[in-house]
Image (cartoon, rainbow, N blue to C red):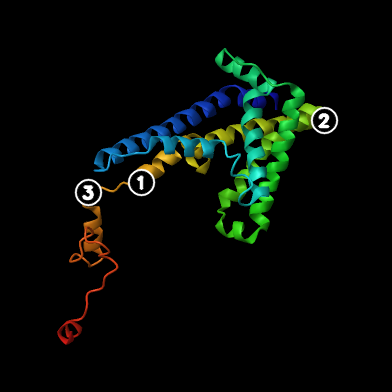
Amino acid sequence: MESWIEFGRGPLFRIAFSLMLLGLARIFALTVLGLVEAYGRSSDKIVNWREVRNQTIAWLFPMNRLWRKRPVYSTISFFFHLGLLLVPLFLAAHVLLWKRAAGFAWPALPQRLSNYLALVAIVAGLGLFSGRFLYPAARKLSRRQDLAWPLLLVLPFITGYVCSNLAIRPTTYDAMMLVHVYSANLIMLLIPFTKIAHCVLAPLSQIVTAMAWKFPAGAGDRVAATLGHADRPTWVKNSRMVQAAPADEVSAK
């Protein structure tokens, strides 16, 4: 089992991380190219960059929005993402693993703080799953992957915490470490192909929204023609709200 663990920590980790990085870079590049193409086709070149910047910051750091709607769910989600980002990147054992794989590293978090963040991520992840599964409105909107992802994401946290903090037998430790390493590699392999890819698209979400509402010139008239209203050009004020009067009503007047 030791050889399988070392394989997961070494070659498989490098493969999984490289594929995740390349996949996310591809998604990011395609999104940027799509934005450039949409901007080039649009006749309206006006973009409120200040508003886009402010909205982007508000989405990346949603402290002012946490308690407006579904405050409990939003707060749980915030702390889940906090642990999800900090522990994998700054846990001392992970920093050492990165140094072995790439030859360089960065400062690590104190072990006690890492343990607290891991527990927060575990509790919050299970809370998100419970909210999506038990709350009828959320369950109707959730796909299978929406229910599976919180459980998969907390799996390496649970196994890693057990291996680092509990006194267990060597065989149990090896089994838990095997699950920890391979579940983490599986997550990295799946990220570019699932909704979790939003981790790199979040900074672009507001500019995508701003550009999505800029239609090419003449698009409104083509939509009207498709709907059978080619005789009502979009440049006429309230043209879509005005119904043509029947011929007999016109003659009666």
The residue under the point 48% across, 34% down is 200
How far apart marks 1 and 2 lie (CA) works out to 51 Å
Give the residue type at disc 1.
Ala
Residue 166 disc label: 2
> Which residue lies at the image location 31% right of the left edge and 35% below the top edge?
36
Examine the image and state in which quarter residue 251 appears. Answer: bottom left
Q: Which mark is residue 217?
A: 3
Please, what secondary structure does the residue beneath circle 3 have? loop
**Is residue 54 rendered to the left or right of residue 31?**
right
Between the residue at mark 3 and the residue at mark 1, the CA separation in whole angstroms equals 14 Å
> Quick one: quadrant of the N terminus?
top right
Classify mark 3: residues with Cα within 10 Å, few (<14), some (14-19) or many (20+): few
> Which residue sits furthest left?
251
Quick one: label 3 or label 2, which is nearer the N terminus?
2
The image quarter containing residue 246 is bottom left
Task: Single out the residue that lies furthest toward the top.
Answer: 103
Residue 175 showing in the rendered view: no
Which residue has dot 1 on it? 212
The reply to whether the C-beta atoms of the residues labelled 1 and 2 are less than 8 Å apart is: no
- The image shows residue 175 at horizontal and vertical percentages of 73, 33
